[in-house]
Each structure stands twice: as C-alpha cells, then as structure tokens.
Amino acid sequence: MLFQVEMKVNLPSDMPESQATEIKATEKAYSQELQRYGKWRHLWRVAGSYANVSIFDVKDNTELQDIISRLPLFPYMEISVKPLCRHPSSIRDDDS
Amino acid sequence: MLFQVEMKVNLPSDMPESQATEIKATEKAYSQELQRYGKWRHLWRVAGSYANVSIFDVKDNTELQDIISRLPLFPYMEISVKPLCRHPSSIRDDDS
Amino acid sequence: MLFQVEMKVNLPSDMPESQATEIKATEKAYSQELQRYGKWRHLWRVAGSYANVSIFDVKDNTELQDIISRLPLFPYMEISVKPLCRHPSSIRDDDS
Amino acid sequence: MLFQVEMKVNLPSDMPESQATEIKATEKAYSQELQRYGKWRHLWRVAGSYANVSIFDVKDNTELQDIISRLPLFPYMEISVKPLCRHPSSIRDDDS
Amino acid sequence: MLFQVEMKVNLPSDMPESQATEIKATEKAYSQELQRYGKWRHLWRVAGSYANVSIFDVKDNTELQDIISRLPLFPYMEISVKPLCRHPSSIRDDDS
Amino acid sequence: MLFQVEMKVNLPSDMPESQATEIKATEKAYSQELQRYGKWRHLWRVAGSYANVSIFDVKDNTELQDIISRLPLFPYMEISVKPLCRHPSSIRDDDS
Amino acid sequence: MLFQVEMKVNLPSDMPESQATEIKATEKAYSQELQRYGKWRHLWRVAGSYANVSIFDVKDNTELQDIISRLPLFPYMEISVKPLCRHPSSIRDDDS
Amino acid sequence: MLFQVEMKVNLPSDMPESQATEIKATEKAYSQELQRYGKWRHLWRVAGSYANVSIFDVKDNTELQDIISRLPLFPYMEISVKPLCRHPSSIRDDDS
Amino acid sequence: MLFQVEMKVNLPSDMPESQATEIKATEKAYSQELQRYGKWRHLWRVAGSYANVSIFDVKDNTELQDIISRLPLFPYMEISVKPLCRHPSSIRDDDS
Amino acid sequence: MLFQVEMKVNLPSDMPESQATEIKATEKAYSQELQRYGKWRHLWRVAGSYANVSIFDVKDNTELQDIISRLPLFPYMEISVKPLCRHPSSIRDDDS
C-alpha cells in the first residue's frame, strides 16, 4: 500500500554541529535500510530546499507510523501524508 | 529531469455529462501515451479525492509546460509543481 | 484499517430542489448500507455546519477510494483524509 | 455530548529528556483514566505524525475545558475542537 | 451552554431581488423568535461587513445544529462555531 | 461602542513558573477591575484552549488600545479585533 | 475616529457592461460626497489591482457600517477593517 | 523603477471560445508593444500553469497601475505586485 | 510616490528590558525625523495590537527600502508593502 | 533553464553580530561569483523587506539544488522556487 510523504527539515539553529552530523548519518543509514527492504520505495530531494518527496510501500497505516515515527529527524520535521492507490489511467504494473 | 506534479480536478457543475465523458477519455488516452513514452513516469490517485500525484521525467521546464498545458483537463485543474533531484540518501538507480 | 474523513457539502445554488432531494436520499441509503457492512464505522454531524466527521474501516487505500468516489455527493464535497492507527495510550479494543 | 478534538504535540527542542518522559507518562495515565470513565471515548494516532484524533463524551463545554486544560501536554499542543451531534443518516446507536 | 457563532453571508449574485428580500425577512423573524426564547442570546453586526457575531445559549450540540441548520440563510453562509464556557476571571453571573 | 476581541495566550516555554503565576494574577485583577467598570462587558473561555472571546464596551478606538495594550499578558497574546454595531434584527436593548 | 478599510472589487463576469458602468458611476458620486463631508478622509488605488486603501473618519462603529453597507459596490467587494488610533510617535496633528 | 508582477489567469468556464481567442490576441499584441517600449522588461511562463512572472520597468506606481489595469485579461487575473530595487550584492548594471 | 506599509512588532521574549527601551526610543526619534521631512506621511496605531499602518511618500522603491531597512525595529517586524497611486474617485489634492 | 527563486532571510535574534557579518560577507562573495558565471542571472531586493527575487539559469534541477543548498544563508531562509520557460508572447531573445 502506497503513501506519498513530504518531509521538510527544520533543525533548531542552536543544535550543536556534531549532534546534527550524527542525526543525519543515522537518518541516512536508516533510510537506506528501509529502501533496501522495499519499504521506502522512492526518495527525492525537492530542488532548492531541505525537503524530500517520498513514496512508502507499507502493509498498513500502522507500519507507516512505525517507520516515520522512528526517523531520527522525526522531531525536527514538518510531515504531510497522502494515501495513494492505483490510478485508472496508469499503465505501469508497479504503480500500486 | 524529474518533477512532482499534483493535479486536483474541479469540473464545473454545469458541464454536460457527455462533454465530461469525452474530456476524460481524451485525457486518459493522452496520459497513457505519455506514460508509454516515459514522460509521465508515475501516476497515482490520491485516495478519497479527484486528484493525482504524478512524477514527470522531461528534458526541461519547457517540455513540462508543453505536456501539462496540453492536458484536456488543464483548464479545470489546480496544479502544483515541485522540481526534484537525486537525494543524497537514495540508493535507487532510477530516482534521478 | 481506519481513516478519519471530513466531508463538507457545497451544493451549487442553482441545483433544482428535486435533484438535491434525490441525491441526498441516494447518499443516505448508500451510507447506511456501508454502515451496516461495517465499512463506515462512525458518522457524526459537525454542529452548526453542513459537514460530517466520519471513521472508515477499510481493507486498504484502494477500498477507501472506491467507497468515497462513489458517494453521490462526491462531486459537491470538500474532503480531507487522515490515516489513523492505534494510539499507544488507547485502552479500547476496537480503536484500531 | 460529543466533541472531536485534534491534538498536535510540539515539545520544545530544549526540554530535557527526563522531563519529556515524565510528562508523557503522566499524560498516558491521565488519558487512560479518562478512557475508563468513558469521557475520552476514542483515541487514535494520526499515522506519520505526533498527533491524535479523539472523541470526547462530556456533559457540557465546561467539562470539556476542564479535561483538556488539565492534560499534562496541554501547554505544548495545538488543539482544535469540533462539536458533534447525531447525523441524520447514522444507524449506530452510540453515535450521539 | 454557550457558543460563539460567526456568520458571513454570501448571496449568489444572480438571486432575484424578491427572493433575497423574502429570505431576509424570514431570517429576521426566525432570529427574533429565537432571541425572545433566550436561545440566541446576543446578535451583533460586524461593522463594515455582511456578517454577524452571535452568542447562542442552547441545551447541547444537537440543539445548536437544529437552530443553525434551519436558518433561512444557512445555505448561503460561512459559519464558524466556538464552544464557550465560564472564564475563571469573569465576575458576571450570566457569562456562563 | 462594542468590540469583539479574541485573545490566545502563548507563554514562552522557558518563562519561570513564578513569573507566569504573577502575570496571571495581575491580569486577573486588572480584567476584573475593567469588568466592574463596565469596560470589559463579557469574558468567556473558548473550551479546549488557552484563549478567550471578549466583548469590550469603550468610548472609542483609543480607549480600546489603552486597555488592551496594558494587559499584563499583552506581549504573549495573539489578538484579533472586530468592531461591532447594532444588528438590525437584534431585539435586545443592550446589544449596542 | 479613524478606520483603515481595504476594498477589493470582484464584479461577476456575467454582469452586463451597462449595469457595471452605472454601479461604478453611483459609487464614484457617493464616495466623492463622503469625501467632501470629511467622512472618507483618504482614498488610494492599490497599484496593479482593482482595490483601494481608504481611511474613514467616523463618529463610531455604527456610522462606519452605515457608510460601507450603502456602497453600491458593497455586494461585490471583499472588505477588511482595522480600527486606528493615535500612534505615540506621530507628530502630525490630524493623525487621530 | 522595477516591479515583479505575477499574473495567474482564470478564464470563466462559460466564456465563448471566440471571445477567449480575441482577448488573448489583444493581450499578446499589447504585451509585445509594452515589451518593445521597454516597459515590460521580462515575461516568463511559470511551467505547469496558466501564469506568468514579469518584470516591469516603469516611471512610478501610477504608470504601473495604468499598464496593468489596461491589460485585456485584467478582469480575469489574480495579480500580485512586489516593488523591487537594487540588491547590494548585484553586479549587473541593469538590475535596477 | 506613496506606499502603504503595515508593520507588526514581535520583540523576542528574552530581549533585556533596557535594550527594548533603547531600540524603541531610537525608533521613535528616527520615525519623527522622517515625519518632519515628509517621508513618513502618516503613522497610525492599529487598535488592540503592537502594529501600525503607515503611509510613506518617497522618491522611488530604493528610497523606501533605505528608510525601512534602517528602522531600528526592522529585524523584529513583519512588514507588508502596497504601492499606492491616485484613485480616480479621489477629490483630495494630496492623495497622490 | 530558468527558475525564479524568492528568498526571505530570518536570522535568529541571538546570532552574534560577528557571525552574522561573516555569513553575509561569504554569501555576497558567493552570489557575485555565481552572477559572474551567469548562473545567478538576476538579483533584486524586494523593497521594504530582507528578501530577494532572483532568476537562476542552470543546467537542470540538480544544479539548482547544488547552488542553493550551498548558500551560506541557506539554513536561515524561506525559499520558494518556480520553474520558468519561454512565454509565447515574449519578444526578448534571452527570456528563455
């Protein structure tokens, strides 16, 4: 089941550099693991911003919540979620 | 070059049924042709709405405008565009 | 799988009374059938408005879209959707 | 009398971990007590967020205010309230 | 139980003058009856607009919905509702 | 002359408890004095929030500004003001 | 007593040319009469729009409502009102 | 003197095709004349929309208003205006 | 050339009292000097807020920027700017 | 390929003066280098604000992201991006 998720990162301006570096490294490793498992199906940077557009492929709403709430950057992001489903005009097998 | 495009359809309530049916059929055919050419890379319905989330893969801004402004539903849609690029944490070859 | 759905009805001011009455009657029958099947789990009127707050219990995003897009009032409603899941503090068995 | 309440938690980024843990534990105990008393009728997590959708069943506006203003997380939440009442199409006995 | 209600009137520009006049007269009579019964406790015009601020004193959410949804101008108004209760600093006996 | 004023309090999360307590006590005393003088005609809590809806009865805009800008909580509130006047449908003598 | 009023004109696209011309002429005459009486103290066009910024000098909220609600363009305008008073740094005698 | 102007076109869905064609042709001729005179310095299409971003070089606010209010599409556009001036980091002679 | 400027002051809650007092005194002196020179033509307090509505009379956009960006409170204000010009219905000589 | 980028600077009020000065100097040098290379084609100050309107001429979305995310002020700016393309009414050779 697919969800489009947009995440916009707002790190507090007083977060120590070292802490920011560590959080970002953990986030990267975690996100790549989820990509390898096929849960985080697409991940794009929105050009000109510290934000991404992502497509998640999860079993249900609960798994989506589990994954997103464990993101190391979760406390520092504005997140919006849209449930997706197959579009009647789609011709692509894996767009659902 | 990738763009995320969100389209929300608002047909006028006084559009004759037959005209709506024809526009939607033309839109479908046109969108499927663009999908076959690889220009309209992904097309998802947003669940609970008459809207879609799409990923376009075009040569440049001009081609994006050419494609979108020729959509038969173009005059009846709210459209928002986000330029995308490769995310440094992406592991997927075709996410760019 | 649960979704909170808010629907706000905006009938065009030039819709004939008889057409409005018919649409509302069909909507009511359809909504009650969905309630009996357990798909439309809760349905409340928002006091002071022509709007409702609903909880749907569906198999997946696709079923949500199927149900909502077939509502007779669908073309005349602003609809917002929130995917829900179990809250860690909930003590109620059926809140998930 | 029913109210839909949405709560979005924004803990200050400089709140000590121990203080956050304590507030959340108190909040959880308090919310479960209110659920047992039937005041906090439903409690769902909004997937992909640190937010919930709740249904309260209270005697009047005053009791709603008493309950919500005593939530340990009250100073750290954006809260929106919608008064609910029975929907004419509802078939469920306890949807009011 | 008190509610603050704001109503902003938007009559369609093609409504015949006679129909508008009749609706407004019915609205006025109905609102004055509700004032006499003590249900519509205050009614003020917002200066510089076709809008009002009102205070309703009703038994519960259901009665609020009954009253507002029967307003002849109901289909032509944007309405917002805020549940009120006694303020701890109020000294006025009837502010609750 | 009447004004509706809505005030939403946002105390900084790092304000010492004692300072908050003192400001609130001063605010309460000041508001009750203004109520006794008839300047602050109504004061209601918005249920489920740290906000109020108030009706002020002042000589002119200048007096409104004098009163509001001297509120001890003034620096910590979002405030919105609506000038009111008699509604042609009002039957209540003191609604103006 | 001064008020800033911003008015944005939205004429329905199907209003006959002759009707629009007449309304605008009546509006102009009415506004100039109010300027001569000193009630409509300033009137500026917002460059690049069909909108104005105005300063009214009226006895009270009621007079403001009387004047604005009688504007021939009143049903076709979005109007926002801000009550003004003397600024402590103003050196101009008539800025109040 | 430079202004950035964004224009978004919303033609009424019931405007006859021939009228739309004529308005657009007149608009094009008028805009090209203004470009030749150096008044309309830049004109870009916003990709994926029926909107443009423009830079005007005018004598003053009055000339800006004269030019924009005479656009044939003026009644059908949402327009926003930003006054521009030389940026202290600009190295380009004609960016002012 | 006239501009309407609205300024809303948001001083950080941790700014020392003495620093706030000094900034406000400098702001006052600077604003009064600009008023004497005829650059800051009008200055009003918006009643019920820490905000003002002002009319500036400047040579061009550059002078507007010079004046506003040198305001001592500039870093602490939300500022909106509207270019003004003569309204065709104005009868006042100096409204342009 | 052209993009309009609007940048609004919000420096934290507790950033040391020396740090702000250094960031701004680096930003200026970097922006001027990009202007000399033709990447940052236009740069204007929005009068009355700490914001700019810019036109970038880049190879693709990736280059836009590379340039913007390396701006020294990037963490302190709200940035909005609009992809541009040639307007059919443009007569200027380099407006594309």
Image: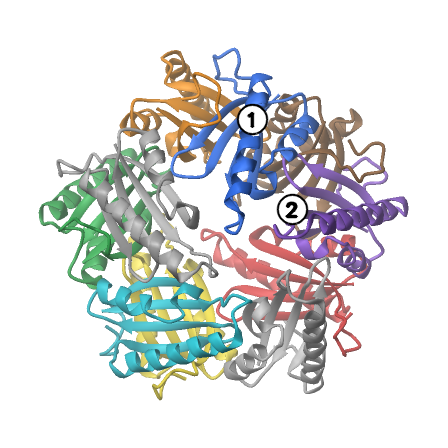
Chain colours: B green, C orange, D blue, E brown, F purple, G red, H yellow, J cyan
Q: Quadrant of the C terminus of chain F?
A: top right
Real-space CA distance between mark 1 and mark 2, rounded to the nearest whole angstrom: 48 Å
Quarter of the view holding residue E57: top right
Whole-percent x, y for residue H24 in the image: 31, 63
Whole-percent x, y for residue D13 in the image: 50, 50
Q: Mark 2 lies on which chain?
A: E
Q: In this view, does C42 lie to the left or right of E70?
A: left
Whole-percent x, y for residue J58 in the image: 23, 71
Q: Is residue J88 left or right of residue E93?
A: left
Q: In this view, does F28 lie to the left or right of D59?
A: right
Residue highlighted by disc 2 = E50
> In the figure, B13 relative to B80: above or below?
above
Residue at 52 percent across and 73 percent down: it is J16
Q: Nearer the viewer, residue F16 or D4?
A: F16
Residue at 84 percent across and 47 percent down: it is F29
Indicate which disc residue D29 carries. Answer: 1
Q: Nearer the viewer, residue E4 or H17?
A: E4
